Image: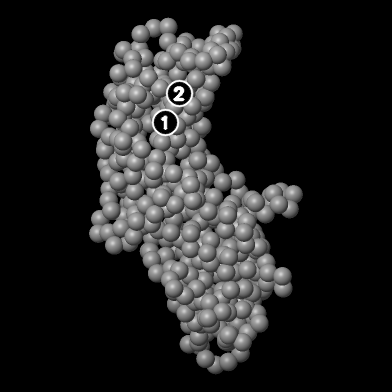
Amino acid sequence: MPQTPIFSSMLGSSCSGQVQPDMGERCVDPVYQDGNLVSGSLEALIERLVPTMDYYPDRTYIFTFLLSSRVFIHPHELLAKVGQICLKQKQQLETGTEAEKLKSFTAKIIQLLKEWTETFPYDFQDEKSMKELKEIAHRITQCDEENGTVKKIISQMTQNLLMALSARSQYQEIREKFRQPVTDKGTILKTKPQSTQKDILNVCCDPLILAQQLTYIELERVSNIYPEDLMQIVSHMDSLDNHKCRGDVTKTYNLEAYDNWFNCLSMLVATEICRVVKKKQRTRMVEFFIDVARECFNIGNFNSMMAIISGMNLSPVARLKKTWSKVKTAKFDVLEHHMDPSSNFCNYRTALQGAAQRSQTANSNREKIVIPVFNLFIKDIYFLHKIHTNRLPNGQINFKKFWEISRQIHDFLTWKQVECPFEKDKKIQSYLLTAPIYSEEALFIASFESEGPENHMEKDSWKTLRTTLLNRA
């Protein structure tokens, strides 16, 4: 991502861009409504991307088009088309005697490439894209052979791009490996007292501190999710709809790792609760996680909050009626109200909107934190994709659809750039990321050992699970 806040003024009230290159409301391709670009052919949209001597596309358009273009054309093919248009304009300017105009045009092309490489560095991961980039760079550096200023700028841009690609590649190599749930019978079956067994309360007994460390982990993972990762949701769904596999679609490791983190946190919460032997201690554990979830909500970390609630709502935990009867559930009821799925999670969306508004006017990073429920965020993009077609009946690209998708992704990008205000606690984070978690089967076994089966169905399930586990040795 770029170091400068290029998205700070994005996607305001107008989606048209500030200047339209020789295009007006009368134009058939592209089409404008009330000054807003709503559709156009791929060729016309590409032409609108490329600067001219007296035109530079609005940043909102650059971002939205580069984000959505991958649905219709591979980045290296788009680069080739941009290069062709640049060459044509350069040749036209060279035929005249206005050298200053050529320099102005060159500067705008460099700015476009700079924004592209900073915002979507992964578009240049393959040799074809890098080749096209170098080809465009070679053409425009010929305009500045005297002092080499353009060449220096392009050299720095390329260096920054390679550093960004290297950093992302390293992250993918060291991304967390999926923790395998514990299924060993000696670990799960409570044949020995567990009074000395280490649990989360031994590591951190302050709900606020744990919520802060969860937020630190969330922001760290979110920072490695890129706009093109999110756009692959659309690309993948198009591939599935067309019953074909696009070989150029990169596997979204970062999305998978983040989704895996949510699942691991949910299972960790359930594990911590179910493996406690004594009811009094188990009640304390439930109330502790309720307090952690509440602190997450106050911070604006809705993803961890949802993961914790999901863990406590898993059947092995929910069935512990004797434990829940001792829990002061008023706080939990409030949390569940916020995450009520009715009316498309209306309560949650209201809370999210409030956090987003607070973030916009905040003076501190602490108040700027907004971490949405990632699964719901992904579903919103998917929903936008499914209810609106990529192309209109006349064959033009439905750009109005992609304005809305880019608006959603822009919000996410703004939130993910917040610097975490909390100091990292290695001990707590190590436990959160590496502590053993039980499989669903193991959770039921631990749950039944904590509070025995209450009916014939549960008794049959308990016998089957225990026999299966003992025979697995």
Position above or below: 220 against 284? below
Q: Residue furthest bottom?
A: 97
Residue at the extreme front: 455
Q: Which residue is mark 1?
A: 312
Quadrant containing the C terminus in the rendered view: top right
| Residue 349 image offset from top left, x and y in percent | 42, 53
Label 2 belongs to which residue?
Answer: 319
- Going by the numbered disc 2, the residue's amino acid type is Arg
Q: Quadrant of the N terminus?
A: bottom left
Front-most of residues 116 and 451? 451
- Callout 2 crowding tier (Cα within 10 Å): few <14, some 14–19, many ≥20: some
Q: On screen, 344 above or below 278?
A: below
Helix, strand or loop under label 2: loop
Which numbered marker is on residue 210? none
- Please tell me which of labels 2 and 1 falls first in the chain: 1
* Colour scheme employed for the rendering of this structure: one colour
Q: Residue at x 44, y 55 (%)?
A: 412
- From the viewer's side, name the closer residue of 450 and 72: 450
**Residue shown at the point (39%, 43%) measured from the top left:** 337
Residue drawn at (56%, 17%) of the image = 457
Front-most of residues 127 and 280: 280
- Three-letter residue code for mark 1: Met
Res 297 quadrant in image:
top left
Asked if residue 18 is positioned above or below residue 298 in the image, the reply reads below
Q: Residue 460: where, in percent of width, then height? A: 57, 13
Viewer-nearest residue: 302 or 178: 302
Mark yes or no: residue 74 visible.
yes
Residue at 48% across, 35% down: 263
Say what secondary structure mark 1 lies in: helix
Q: Which is more foreground, mark 2 or mark 1?
A: 2
Dividing the picture into quadrants, the one containing residue 74 is bottom right
